[in-house]
Image (tube, helix red, strand yellow):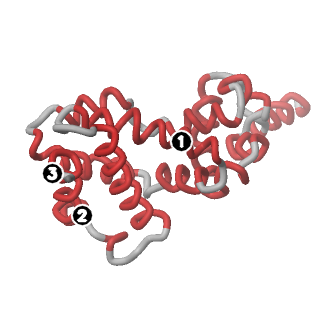
Amino acid sequence: MTKSVDQTKARRRGRRPGGADTRAALLDAAREVFAEQGYDGATVRTIATRAGVDAAMVNHWFGSKEGLFIKAVLQLPFDPAELIDRLVDGPPETLGERIVRTFLTIWDTTGGAYFTAIIRSVSSQEQAAHLLHDFFVKQVFSRIAGSVAPDRALFRGSLVASQIVGMGMARYVVKFEPLAGTDIDTMVTAVAPNVQRYLTGDLS
């Protein structure tokens, strides 16, 4: 009887089973570890240990560290297509405001962890930088700009990306004050007009 109780306790203290909860645990752990150590510094073993699972589960669910990075970090806590539809659903003249408010709200909700993980990873890994560029510039901001821009949608999308990423850097990574602690409404009032000019203004 004692042996059975001890075995039960051991199982409770051991690793998680290889189910859907393992996938969720790996995603949560990966976001934390990538934010702390960047892409190069984060290892599959470290992420798996943080999640309380066997390292083989990373390959099982995501194929590789890169696959896990894409799912955990580049694919932020929103669906890109749904986000774009939501942002462009409104007056074109207030699109800049909606963009700034939406991204600040998403990132503030997690204390900037998603954004910090991205920046620290792309600064140390070229492939991650390409993935980030493809996501932000091509898949998000250029498509948004294309819905309202009179011309040069890719260039305008790149300008918007530079504004939003730069804002995130100052707010969450280097934490410039008072910007880092400024409320969202004030940030929107200050930043949105510039984003709007990038989207629809005269860039000649």
Label ID, residue 88 = none
Mark 2 lies on residue: 187
Upstream in the sequence, badge 1 or badge 3? Answer: 1
Mark 3 = which residue?
Answer: 202
Separation of residues labelled 1 and 3 (CA atoms): 34 Å
Q: CA distance from mark 3 to mark 2?
A: 23 Å
Most foreground residue, 154 or 43: 154
Task: Return the x and y of residue 60 as percentages of the image width and height.
Answer: 72, 23
Q: Secondary structure at mark 1?
A: helix
Give the label, 3 or 2, closer to the camera: 3
* Three-letter amino acid code at the position of disc 2: Met
Q: Which residue is mark 1?
A: 73
The percent position of residue 170, horizontal first and vertical second, equals 41, 67
Amino acid, disc 1: Val
Decide if residue 199 is on the left or right side of residue 4.
left
User: Within the image, what quadrant is residue 184 found in?
Assistant: bottom left
Among the two numbered marks 2 and 1 on one chain, the one whose residue lies closer to the N terminus: 1
